Image (tube, rainbow, N blue to C red):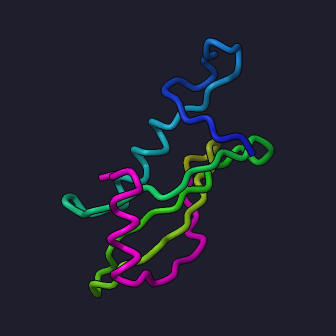
Amino acid sequence: MAHEPSVAAGATNANGRTQIDTAARDATFRKMFRANEQVWLLDEQYDSVEAVWRVDFLRVSDQGQWLHQRYKYDMATSVVFFMGERPVAVEQVRATRRAARRFQ
């Protein structure tokens, strides 16, 4: 699996490697989240064989529980698949929020 987020689909970077578009993916995910929701991007991996992104987020559920949620984004159809979630302890949330990138 290659992890090469970039800005333009099919564009080539300085090393001649194809770059993968994340703008459409991110816009699709942002539609799923509430306007002022705090969301952290934990991991993103592009699978060139399946042409999908596997993306993990840290966010708060409607019940107030912090969750590590996994999704799969299909590049060809722009469809998001929910792949599961697990609760995250408050202590782990603090460390994760310091280390991860704020998505929204």
In the displayed structure, 94 sits above or below 9; it is below
Q: How many marks?
A: 0
Q: Residue furthest bottom?
A: 63
- Comparing 95 with 26, the one in front is 95
Q: Residue furthest left?
A: 36
x%, y% of residue 64? 27, 84
x%, y% of residue 90? 33, 82
Horizontal placement of 57 versus 84: left or right? left
Q: Magenta residues, as a range?
A: 79-104
Rendered image quadrant of residue 40? bottom left
22 falls in the magenta region: no
- Comparing 22 with 100, the one in front is 100
Rendered image quadrant of residue 79? bottom right
Horizontal placement of 19 versus 66: left or right? right
83 falls in the magenta region: yes
Q: Residue at x 55, y 35 (%)?
A: 5
Q: Residue at x 60, y 58 (%)?
A: 72
x%, y% of residue 52? 66, 48
Rendered image quadrant of residue 87? bottom left
Q: Residue furthest right?
A: 49
In the displayed structure, 18 sits above or below 46; it is above
In the displayed structure, 63 sits above or below 4; it is below
x%, y% of residue 77? 61, 46
Q: Residue at x 33, y 79 (%)?
A: 61
Q: Residue at x 45, y 63 (%)?
A: 57
